[in-house]
Amino acid sequence: MDGLLSEAFIASLFFGAVTAGVPLLLAGLGEQVSEKAGVLNIGLEGMMLAGAFAGFATAYATESFLAGFCAGILAGMAVSLIMAVLCVVLGMNQIVVGIAITLGAEGITALLHHVLYSRSYPRLSRVETWTIPGLADIPYVGQAFFDRNVLIYLAFALTFFMIWVFRRTQAGLNLQAAGDAPAALDAAGVSVTVTRFASVLVTGCLGGLGGAYMATVGGGLFLPFMTGGAGFIAIVLAMLARGNPLWILFGAFLFGASLALTTALQVVGVNIPTDVIQMLPFAMVIVVLLLFARHSYLPPALGLPYQRGAR
Amino acid sequence: MEPDPVGAPDGDAALALHDITRRFPGVLANDRVSLVFRRGEIHALLGENGAGKSTLIGIVSGMVRPDSGSIEVAGAPVRITSPSAALRLGIGTVYQHVLLVPSLTVLENLMLGGSWSRTLDRAATSERFTELAELLSFRVSPDAPVGRLSLGEQQQVEIMRALWHGELVLFLDEPTSMLTPQGVDDLGVVMRRLRDHGVAIVFITHKLKEASDLADRISVLRQGRVVGEVSPGELRTMSPDAIIERVVAMMFGHGGKAEDLRATLVGDAAEPQARQNAVAGMEPLLVLRGGRTAGQRGECALDGADLEVRPGEIMGIAGVDGNGQKHLAEVLAGQRMLTTGSISLAGREIGHLGVAGRRRLGVRYITDDRLGEGTAPRHSLAINLVIKEIGSPHFWKGGITLWRRIHDHARNLIRTYGIVAPSERASLAGLSGGNIQKVLLAREWTGDARLLVVSKPTYGLDLQNTRRARDWIKSIGGNRDAAIVVISNELEELIDVSHRIAVMERGRIAGIVKNRRGARTAIGRLMAGVGDA
């Protein structure tokens, strides 16, 4: 077991944590935006899957990762458009619609995958990375953080961009008001419907991008149901983060690390049944909930449709 | 009746409404309403529940669109299509319920509503804040989170926001309902100051006393129509009694019935009838000692509350909303447990008992949340009358519901309490507010009641039902077997019905006042946190 402290083990753990954590980070940041505005977006898993499929299929056909990312964003936004129309405009139950979206996206992406590739699972070519000179050679963490695809750097930057948006911009203020006291926002002359609509589209955009990352940079292939609950973990992260993007960053890598543990343990040849190891992230969710959920703060109007005059 | 504008010439008109009509399914909420609001004038709009006041506010603030009619701002015709359009026209509204975001600071709340793409301009906002704070002489800290401010301070922030984009017209919807007597006086000072600054102030109320004290002009709404006006000239020359006489006649039409309602409407009339109780010196029936509870964010918990109520006594609990009244009611009813302290009924400790256990001992609770925790609105009237004794052997046998007994029981109570309903099988949600209140009274006040807790007994009721509910409470007082606790934020109501009045302030009983001449002043001081009992 002394292999557990070796450079190979720790480096591969960090590397895997980043690989598995980035889609959680992207999707979690997106979910945070709509939760702040009062929309509990249970359809996130479906948006990620749609993004994963569209991202992979486009990147495979065009041989361009960038085109894949764009397609993932568009697919995620297309799915979130359904959510926005049904829940924000028509005021339907967010949980019912969210579940329907997730189940629908699972079915449709699996079907499309079958139509396009039959039973084969084509792979993308190697990921292009941006190596940051100097930093990439740091032992343990260099490979994990500084020799990666550009999207990973963007995801980190996005965390700090969101902090700025929430603290310093009118948009951040409007989002928070839409979730905490929508009637107050309405009375201040800002449309709650538009605010929430936009927030759901942002969630779709980031969820789709997270999904596209999984199927391109992350795995390089698309498997039906490949998100495997990542969308739900991102929802939990957003709920526990109390509106602070830094907590999402922290949580995403905590879960990413527990997901990566499987591979890392195999690298050093520790033999634990994979079933046990695969339970880790979900056991982690329960532990984290036990520790932090009591202190979580959810917007008072989360999950409630808003109609002007129905006060 | 057409209002006939006397006094200031129409050149001063800040906002004019012509023949505004708005229909909701089954209701004509505003029926050809024509009103002129003038610069430099405090204009009171009086009316009962359902007179069309809220719809009118909705129309001028852009929340509701009129079906027909026209609106002029400073002489130019306008259409108010949204709240932001209203604000841009200089029409600000302070709503009855606070519309601020509790998690944001004062300044952030005032910045809400700016353009999406902007970063926050704190400097410019601070500047306007200081300017308005000076004009209004408010001393609210701009960086305090709104959730930590008192209701009076929150209202000040709302007034600032309403005036933010210009000081043309200010609508205040029932602005005094959440304030202490001192707070009401302060608001009066602010209103006069703004009037002298040239703002048109429209102040909506159902309290005649306030209207005649504060307003330069009074318009009366009834069933969606403007039914009369008292002009500034008349307000100056008529005696207060004559004004009241005149407005009561407008609100209810002429006739004997109006006389009964007068006392309810004009708070002052209650004082000479203040009630004394003959039970002084008897052993208390209910004793609460050192009651403390744990509160969630934003709730006021009990913080060492002491209360004794004697048998046959009606104990009023006064105080500004949010000073622990809700926790007190729940603690007495058994819905919330004390963290420390004790509570006993007729010498027996009941602190450890839940709702069911206390109900068996005769504890009854009439909540103000009538459609939420009080009833199951979609179920029938009959079920709602037995909902607190589901499974009792009288109505259920071996798990089988004895519908005939339940319906007989309901028909009895409907007759006794004069509940107006199509039948005992009708769903409760279809009943009017007054009748739903009667259902609760009928259900709770049964022969074996020892303690009755009533929270805001007339909240949301119209004048007739308010009168009826208060008379009912008075009629059950003096019953030697039971103690009655009435919690209300309407001081007049407590002075009308109670024997003694306790004032709650920040989770404690700040003092208890015998209900006799001068009680009002003593209570006002206690509510403001400056008095001693």
Image (tube, rainbow, N blue to C red):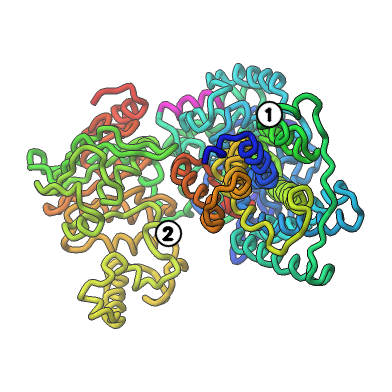
Element marked by disc 1? loop
Q: Is residue B332 above or below residue B172?
A: below
Q: Where is mark 1, residue-wise?
A: A139
Question: Rounded to the nearest whole Å, what is the CA distance between mark 1 and mark 2?
Answer: 65 Å
Judge left or right: residue B163 versus residue B50. right
Judge left or right: residue B289 versus residue A78. left
The region drawn magenta spans: B182-191
Badge 1 sits on which subunit?
A: A
Q: Are marks 1 and 2 in contact (CB under 8 Å)?
A: no
Q: Whole-percent x and y of residue B240? A: 44, 34
Give the residue drawn at x 30%, y 76%: B411
Q: Whole-percent x and y of residue A150? A: 81, 38
The answer to if B57 sits in the magenta stretch is no
Q: Whole-percent x and y of residue B85? A: 75, 41
The answer to if B188 sits in the magenta stretch is yes
Q: Where is mark 2, residue-wise?
A: B371
